Image (cartoon, grey):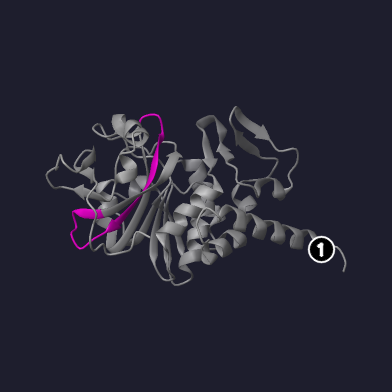
Amino acid sequence: MGQSSPSERLDQIRRDYAERVSSRTRPPDPRVVAAFATVPRERFLGPGPWLIRSADGYIRTPDADPARIYRDVLVALEPLQRLNNGQPSLHAAAIARLGLRRGETVLHIGAGTGYYTAILAELVGPAGHVHAYEIEPRLAALARANLAERENVVLHNETEQPVLPPADAIYVNAGAGGPQRRWLDALTSAGRLIFPLTGDDGTGVMLLLMRTPDPQVFGARCLGPVQFIPLVGGHDDIASPHIAAAWTDGRLARARSLVAGKPLEPATCLLEGDGWWLSSDEISSPATSPE
């Protein structure tokens, strides 16, 4: 057999990468693996060489070979602002937990240049819809160009969308001190929301919320520790200063529901926010399964 062509080599590198970064989920979701194997990451990062995030800052790749960015690494989009194309394995695991189905509508808040938006678009398919939001003007312009050929994606300027369209799933990629009311209100009867619940230092957990028949109560699961750049307007005066401690002492890992707009119950409250609180109470009949 002859040598593979450069495009065949890159296709194989992309397939191997997709399998690796999807391995956090056991068993890996084959649809998520296929989406990561299909979407070319390099098209969303600009021309190489690229800046790879490290413990000490950024390291420039020695060349522009796309194989350099098919690893489980963060790649700079705006290094001075610490805005990156995030860790693929973290996003693969979170997206798998959204359980997206073909034909669904998903909102992507904090779209960056559109790479993970494109992954979401692959999963909901041509009959589905992705509404993407990016507030940073340069990144939004790049995302608009990068996603122009995807007919099932609409890119919005987030500041122009105070009311969100109804959504089966919402995926937030900027840290917030609590769930915004408009996110919760946008969820359909079986809606799922994943967002980084982060404190003042940007550290916290990825939190999954699931709509229940009671519009004020949501099933909740902590998906693990994360660090994110803060969402503009996402600070919660009550919760934000206490999120790091709530993760460190194990309270967030015990969260089974989130209550919005009902009186707090001290016996089960794990973390209080502005108009919401996390509870250790299990929801007996969530509209969608947490597993």
What's the amino acid at mark 1? Answer: Ser
Magenta region, residue range: 200-218
Looking at the picture, how far across and down is residue 132, in whole percent?
Answer: 43, 54
Left or right of 158: which side holds 64? right
Q: Residue furthest left?
A: 263
Q: For the N terminus, give its image quadrant.
A: bottom right
Q: Residue furthest top?
A: 56
* Foreground pick, 266 / 80: 266
Q: Residue furthest right?
A: 2
Q: Which residue is mark 1?
A: 4
Residue 19 sits above or below residue 135 on the image:
below
Q: For the C terminus, give its image quadrant.
A: bottom left
Looking at the picture, how far across and down is residue 225, in whole percent?
Answer: 43, 40
Asked where in the image residue 215 lies, by quadrant, the reply is bottom left
> How many marks do you count on the picture?
1
Left or right of 132: which side holds 265? left
Question: Can residue 135 be seen at all in this image of the molecule?
Answer: no
At 47% from the left and 42% from the top, the residue drawn is: 137
Looking at the picture, how far across and down is residue 284, in whole percent?
Answer: 22, 61
At 52% from the left and 58% from the top, the residue drawn is: 118
At 38% from the left and 39% from the top, the residue drawn is: 231
* Foreground pick, 126 / 202: 202
Can residue 252 be found in the magenta stretch? no
Residue 148 sits above or below residue 264 on the image:
below
